[in-house]
Image (cartoon, rainbow, N blue to C red):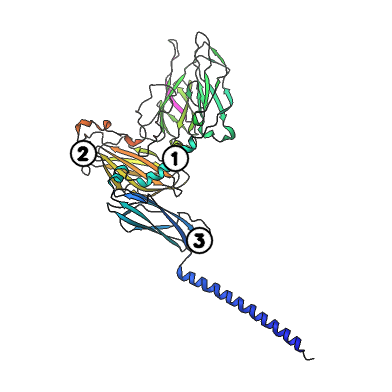
């Protein structure tokens, strides 16, 4: 039966609509393909968004700026520094370092400089950015700013933030318990006192510091003394952040007027020019004329961190470099068991607190502190007169540190010291230090290259991708040299003479006191030192 006019019209309308829909779909697909082809033609691979910041934006002719590249992969994925290549360039001046953070110096020129970075990475990622910095010939600017003014600017921002946090009121320590090892002891016999404390919500437990009977330690072997036949228990104090402190009396126990047999005195002191190496010495005390003799033949040490050692001599060295730096103090109980020639046993203990400089510098100054050991401990000139100082350096921060440049200041007894800017790789051999990674390098003081120089300070500057500044100062000197100007004396008399700049403790026990607190000076609040 033939279709009516209305049926034919409806069928034609359906075919037309389907054709329009199909045509629109083809146009859409073609448009998408065209955009993709254009994008492929413009970018040979996925793009990286690069943000480049330069600090400071105004610079003196002898200054140094810090340039930092932050990278994000288009599409929302974050891009890390690992696996990416950074190619830096500048319209004039010198770029120091490599990686996402570098330094730039104008080499005495003035004007506006353009600093650029091109970033590439697998599989075919790329991106670029540029920024400008203005260099002025301003005598006042040059006189009042240090060469590392870019790093200094970031540093003082970090100090300000750290001090704002430190100014907040601290939490008062809450003492949980105090335990006493023995209910009765002889006068002078060790009795272990252990204290536990916390702060509200455990928010500031990292700042707690324990003092028992005037000596530092969370678990301390206390030796009681009778006064007129009576024992008066001393106090216990727990200190928190911001000067907060809680005092309680020590629990009472019985002290008898008797003498312990073969008490052992343990002393300790830091080893020169090391970060966290300490020397321990044990001595058996013979009290009274009728004390039985004791001839030691072996010393079994327990350093309180799970490490043990047996020595034939009464001295042992131990390195606490592996200790975490997440608290202001780390407390250890060091024990020694001494065996005599007839099999007799004498035991001694000492409470030992390590002040964690890395933690202190982060919360007090907002910067990353590099721990370092020197080898040899005190470098002496070789047969050729050259002083060679080996350095092992590391940090405990949870981010990678990118080293940007080094300032080398030489002291030759003249009113004006000489400052040279060095590339990091020429000294350290690398521009990045991973968390916990120990980098080793050598500092040299050559009398042929630096005539009259008795001391050289190396200030190493760096930063993380998040802008946390990092700093280290290491010195190398010639103890046998005389400065050009005899009026300033020997190297030990030269201002800022700090062998290795680690600490300045002599090789010997501090006054022979048992359990003397860690006397390493805390880092100073000084951006240049």
96 shown above or below 476? below
Q: Earlier in the sequence, mark 2 or mark 1?
A: 1
Can residue 324 be spotted in the picture?
no
Residue annotated with mark 2: 452
> Mark 2 and 3 residues: CB-CB less than 8 Å, in contact?
no
Find the magenta span and give its range.
292-304
Mark 2 nearby-residue class (10 Å; few <14, some 14–19, many ≥20):
some
> Mark 2 and 1 residues: CB-CB less than 8 Å, in contact?
no
Marks 2 and 1, how far apart at CA: 40 Å
- Residue 446: x and y in percent read 24, 42
Q: Is residue 297 magenta?
A: yes
Residue annotated with mark 3: 74
What residue is shown at x 32% (from left), y 52% (from top)? 135
- Residue 400: x and y in percent read 44, 48
- Say which of marks 2 and 3 sits in front: 3
- Residue 44: x and y in percent read 45, 68
Quarter holding residue 8: bottom right
Of all residues shown, which one is farthest toward the top? 228
User: Regarding mark 1 in the picture, which secondary structure is present there?
Assistant: helix
Q: Nearer the viewer, residue 157 or 348?
A: 157
Q: Earlier in the sequence, mark 3 or mark 1?
A: 3
Q: Earlier in the sequence, mark 2 or mark 3?
A: 3
Residue 439 appears left or right of 445:
right
Q: Nearer the viewer, residue 72 or 163?
A: 163
Marks 3 and 1, how far apart at CA: 34 Å
- Where residue 160 is drawn, which disc sits there? 1
- Residue 429: x and y in percent read 35, 49
59 shown above or below 15? above
Viewport quadrant of the C terminus: top left
Can residue 358 be spotted in the picture?
yes
């Amino acid at each position: 039966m033939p279709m009516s006019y209305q049926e034919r019209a409806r069928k034609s309308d359906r075919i037309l609509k389907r054709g329009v829909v199909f045509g629109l779909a083809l146009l859409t697909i073609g448009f998408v393909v065209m955009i993709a082809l254009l994008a492929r033609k413009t970018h040979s691979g996925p793009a990286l968004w690069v943000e480049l910041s330069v600090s400071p934006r105004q610079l003196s002719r002898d200054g140094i700026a810090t340039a930092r590249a932050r990278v994000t992969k288009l599409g929302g994925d974050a891009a890390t520094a690992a696996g990416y290549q950074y190619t830096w360039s500048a319209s004039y001046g010198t770029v120091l370092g490599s990686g996402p953070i570098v330094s730039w110096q104008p080499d005495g020129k003035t004007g506006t400089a353009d600093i650029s970075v091109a970033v590439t990475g697998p599989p075919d990622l790329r991106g670029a950015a540029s920024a400008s910095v203005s260099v002025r010939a301003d005598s006042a600017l040059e006189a009042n700013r240090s060469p590392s003014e870019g790093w200094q600017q970031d540093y003082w921002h970090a100090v300000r933030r750290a001090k704002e946090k430190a100014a907040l009121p601290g939490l008062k320590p809450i003492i949980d318990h105090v335990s006493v090892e023995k209910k009765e002891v002889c006068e002078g016999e060790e009795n272990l006192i252990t204290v536990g404390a916390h702060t509200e919500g455990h928010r500031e437990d990292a700042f707690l510091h324990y003092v028992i009977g005037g000596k530092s330690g969370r678990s301390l072997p206390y030796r009681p003394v009778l006064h007129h036949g009576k024992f008066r228990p001393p106090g216990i104090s727990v200190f928190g952040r911001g000067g907060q402190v809680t005092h309680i009396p020590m629990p009472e126990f019985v002290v008898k007027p008797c003498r312990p047999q073969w008490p052992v005195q343990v002393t300790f002191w830091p080893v020169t020019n090391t970060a966290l190496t300490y020397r321990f010495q044990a001595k058996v005390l013979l009290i009274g004329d009728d004390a039985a003799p004791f001839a030691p033949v072996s010393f079994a040490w327990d350093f309180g961190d799970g490490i043990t050692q047996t020595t034939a001599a009464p001295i042992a060295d131990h390195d606490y470099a592996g200790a975490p730096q997440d608290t202001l103090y780390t407390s250890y109980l060091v024990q020694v068991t001494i065996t005599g020639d007839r099999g007799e046993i004498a035991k001694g203990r000492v409470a030992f607190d390590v002040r964690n400089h890395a933690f202190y510098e982060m919360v007090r100054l907002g910067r990353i502190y590099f721990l370092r050991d020197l080898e040899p401990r005190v470098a002496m000139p070789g047969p050729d007169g050259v002083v060679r100082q080996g350095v092992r350096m590391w940090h405990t921060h949870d981010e990678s540190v990118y080293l940007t440049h080094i300032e080398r200041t030489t002291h030759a007894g003249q009113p004006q010291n000489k400052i040279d800017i060095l590339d990091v790789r020429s000294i350290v051999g690398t521009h990045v230090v991973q968390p916990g990674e120990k980098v080793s390098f050598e500092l040299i003081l050559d009398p042929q290259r630096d005539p009259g120089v008795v001391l050289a300070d190396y200030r190493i500057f760096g930063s993380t991708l998040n802008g946390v500044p990092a700093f280290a100062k290491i010195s190398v000197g010639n103890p046998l040299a005389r400065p050009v100007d005899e009026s300033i004396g020997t190297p030990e008399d030269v201002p800022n003479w700090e062998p290795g700049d680690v600490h300045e403790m002599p090789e010997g026990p501090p006054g022979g006191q048992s359990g003397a607190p860690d006397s390493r000076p805390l880092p100073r609040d000084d951006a240049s030192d």
